Image: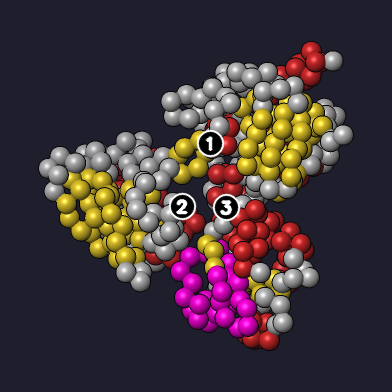
Amino acid sequence: MEHIYDVIIIGGGPGGYTAALYTARAGLDMLLLEKLSAGGQMALTSQIDNYPGFENGVDGFELAEKMQAGAERFGAKTELAEVYSVKLEGKIKEIDTSEGVFYGKTVVISTGASPRELGLEKEQQLVGRGVNYCAACDGMFYRGKTVVVVGGGNSAAADAMLLSRICEKVIIVHRRDTLRATKIYHEPLMQAENVEFCWDSVLTELQYDDKFTGVRLKNVKTGEETDLPCDGVFISVGRKPVTEFLAGQLELDQAGYILADESTRTNLAGVFAVGDVRTKVLRQVVTAVADGAMASHYIDEYLAEQM
Amino acid sequence: MKEMNMNLEQFNKHVQESDKPVLVEFWAPWCVYCRRIAPAYDKIAEQYSDKLVVGKINVDDVPEAAQKEKIEAIPALLLYKGGEVVDSIVAPDSKARIEEFIEKNL
């Protein structure tokens, strides 16, 4: 007979490792599946200032390692496995992964979200060769160069700010005629001497020969197309939840987030959704960890009912 | 983990003279995504210890190696056979992806 865990947690971000801490500490037989390393999106943020308890802020990767270590102190187990597919309907849930099939009485989904792509031709192939999704990660390669930032929200504005300190020139391309980002970003960006704006514009093409050469823009009001030479493009047009592997087994909202309220319970008994992957108003580390704790409470309740 | 880092001499020696294929990760301390790869890369080094030589190049410490390979984005994993690069992958998003990359090239 295969081993059946009380709890299998998919995704090792702050929500996942909090669920791991609470369930391991409660003595449940649990396993966390993570495809790379702890932290999720948080691990790519070098300074987190809005997670309480750190007066000087905290590095996201370090916080992730601490969350993992804190859960492991109570026996939490992690397997570096990529989940391919799941069967969530029965009493025993099946998780098919790169490290084999795992079985659990309950499943916590904490797969988070990842950057949204523009869907342009060759976009995937050019990642790391001119196409970037993380200014904090790849900005350093564009020191003294000209880059385009696509998007108008907070993360696009923050990326543009960061890049303006490294790059020769930053051009923000946005499909509207004003930034959607919080007011706090507007003034410094408008003031920055090396930041320009292309309003009402979208990217229609990525241009390259043996290296990246630029982008083609289309003005959404006039339909006019122009070429904009640049050394790289940073795409910051929002995030999408990682829910494709669920293959329709859980109810999602229109944007693909798992429908669950504060209890983290989904439409399937014994399946819980925590962190950014769940429908919620505020996606933050601090709300993700709250979800992890809530999930453990309802897991206890569910397991007790099953006895 | 630290001892996987090679200097230029070690890099050249391994790549040119190793009987086994050589897997090299080009990385830098300021590269946040490189840190995310590290736990998986350590496991890979263990797992494939009989089939591969696994090392790392800090592009800040050994810029010559990074220039030679025209590294433009990190983390970049390059696989060498007989002194030549046979394949590369940039910023793999899972341990499974790194394994696929190795398996298809072994």
Q: Residue at x 84, y 35 (%)?
A: A3
Q: Is residue A121 left or right of residue A16?
A: left
Residue A141 occupies quadrant? bottom left
Indicate the amino acid at tag 2: Cys
* Distance between mark 1 and mark 2 Cα atoms: 22 Å
* B63 within the magenta span: yes
Indicate the amino acid at tag 3: Asp
- Which mark is drawn over residue B93? 3
A210 w.r.t. A78: above or below: below
Q: Is residue A277 left or right of residue A127?
A: right
Label 1: few (<14), some (14–19) or many (≥20) C-alpha neighbours in 10 Å: few
- Which mark is drawn over residue B10? none
A53 w.r.t. A248: above or below: below
Indicate the amino acid at tag 1: Glu
- Which mark is drawn over residue A244? 1
Q: Residue at x 20, y 48 (%)?
A: A218
**Front label number (1 vs 3):** 1
Say which quadrant the N terminus of chain A sits in: top right
Label 1 SS: helix
Does the rendering let one see residue A217?
A: yes
Label 3 SS: loop
Q: Residue at x 71, y 19 (%)?
A: A298
* Image coordinates for residue B63, horizontal then vertical, percent: 53, 78
**Front label number (3 vs 2):** 3
Mark 1 / mark 2, whichever is N-terminal: 2
Q: Which residues are magenta?
A: B62-87
* Image coordinates for residue A243, horizontal then vertical, percent: 54, 34
User: Mark 2 = which residue?
Assistant: A134
Which residue is situated farthest in the right direction here?
A1
* Image coordinates for residue A156, horizontal then vertical, percent: 37, 45
The chain under label 2 reads A
